[in-house]
Image: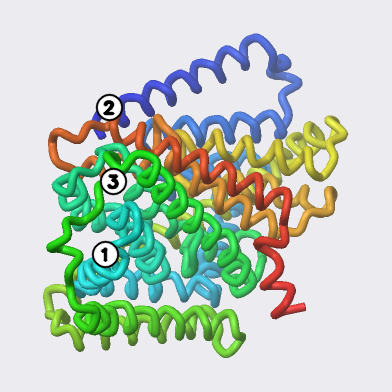
Amino acid sequence: MRALRLDTRTIGFGLIGLMLLAYILFLPPPSRITNAHLGMVMLGLIVAAILLGFPIAFTLMGMGILFGVAAFWRPGMALGDNPVFDSMVLRAYGVMTNDVIISVPLFIFMGYIVERSGIIDRLFKSLELSMARVPAALAVATIATCAVFAAATGIVGAVVTLMGLLVLQPMLKAGYDVKMAAGAIAAGGCLGILIPPSVMLILYGATAGVSVVQLYAGAFGPGILLALLYIGYVMVRAKLNPRLAPPLPAEERNVPRLQIARMLLTSFLPLALLIGAVLGSIVGGWATASEAAALGAIGALALAAAYRRLSWDRLKDSVFLTSRTTAMVCWLLVGSMVFSSTFAVLGGQRILEQWVYSMDLSPGGFMLLSQVIIFLLGWPLDWTVIIIIFIPIFLPMLAHFGIDPLFFGLLTALNLQTAFLSPPMAMAAYYLKGVAPPHVTLGQIFSGMVPFMLLQISAMVMLFLFPQIGLWLPRLLYQ
């Protein structure tokens, strides 16, 4: 992680140097600098500041206020009368009263309780035994467990870290290739970005004004497709080269079927019922996202109590982590709204729109351009930064090109999941390295993730060419 911090600082200083060089060489004289030029400088500075390690939420807010003072200033106006301060208060109040955002802490709390209740280790063991005769049984069970865990948490870091602690050592002891094992864990853990109840989809819905219910319905198709591609890949590789993923020893496979069924009944079924109740109530239209999230939080507490894992320390720890994560998300939204409004007032949005429109792109060309930019931004930047800073830049252009914001959101979610597996800044690799044995190197983890990254790019191409993969269920249910 130290190397990562040094790399991002170097990139940040490099960006600042390039902006200063561009200012000297290309910008007009000071007398002809407009607010639009200030907007573009503002956009470049925020990226550089984030790469340098400044707190994202408060950097967004501070930059928005600083440039907003200049944007809204009029001759004779006192500093305290500047409208940018009223804008900040209104944006904060808007986040506090947003019904969609209420679901964020509840889903996060549900995830932390499930993570600490010991359900996932039971689930993995039961899936491992039930798939014992399948090629690459441990890898298949890992990906399947990650998919279920993702549907119960939506928190990528938690899934990758816990699954790394739980299954990496057993896979290596079973003779699995390090790259195969690391790639399966990292790729499976990243499914939480896409599979509901994804927090990223909630933030996109709040930013783009798209129904979270429809986003959740649309994410099922791409999420299942991606999980099946992962499972198919590890099975084919194991079939072609069994040394990469040796089968389980006969003594471990010879478990009575009744015992396996009992293990599935006590691990997979309760969690599946909880996930089905939460997501089914949302997709079926029986509950809002916030109501379903409350149901999930209560159900997670009930499951933890049933497994006798609901201690006061675990509950207190889950509440603390939920409060910290929720505060970060809410301040990010406030900061992004202040930043976006100032950027729009300065005219930066208009410059970018004119640049894109001047290319005379087709709708497909615009989608390709926007997704390539998002993919490249995903290397050095976290998905939260991309959603709250750069996605609002593309959103006003969707109507011009006749693109459905729902489809754009699904493709973006799949794209950002790809960025989690794209070296050199793939955060999934650093999550896994933090819990991996010392002999597992970062280079091996990166090498193992590359085939899965290519599978995700293939899934993006499939979704781009066949939008009905993500749109058929929302249109079936809500149109």
Kind of residue sitting beneath label 3:
Ala
Q: Secondary structure at mark 2?
A: helix
> 475 or 197, which lies in front?
475
User: How many other residues sit within 10 Å of disc 2, few (<14), some (14-19) or many (≥20)?
Assistant: few
Kind of residue sitting beneath label 2:
Ala
Q: Residue 196: give x, y in percent of width and height.
A: 49, 68
| Residue shown at 18% from the left, 83% from the top | 307
Kind of residue sitting beneath label 1:
Glu
Q: Residue 447: give x, y in percent of width and height.
A: 36, 32
Look at the image and tell me in which quarter the C terminus lies: bottom right
Residue at the limit of the structure toward the top, as seen here: 25
Q: Which residue is mark 3?
A: 245
Image vertical order of residue 358 relative to residue 10, above or below: below
**Among the 4 quarters of the image, the one containing residue 119:** bottom left
Q: Which residue is mark 2?
A: 3
Query: Gap between marks 3 and 1, in whole Å?
Result: 13 Å
> 438 or 3, which lies in front?
438
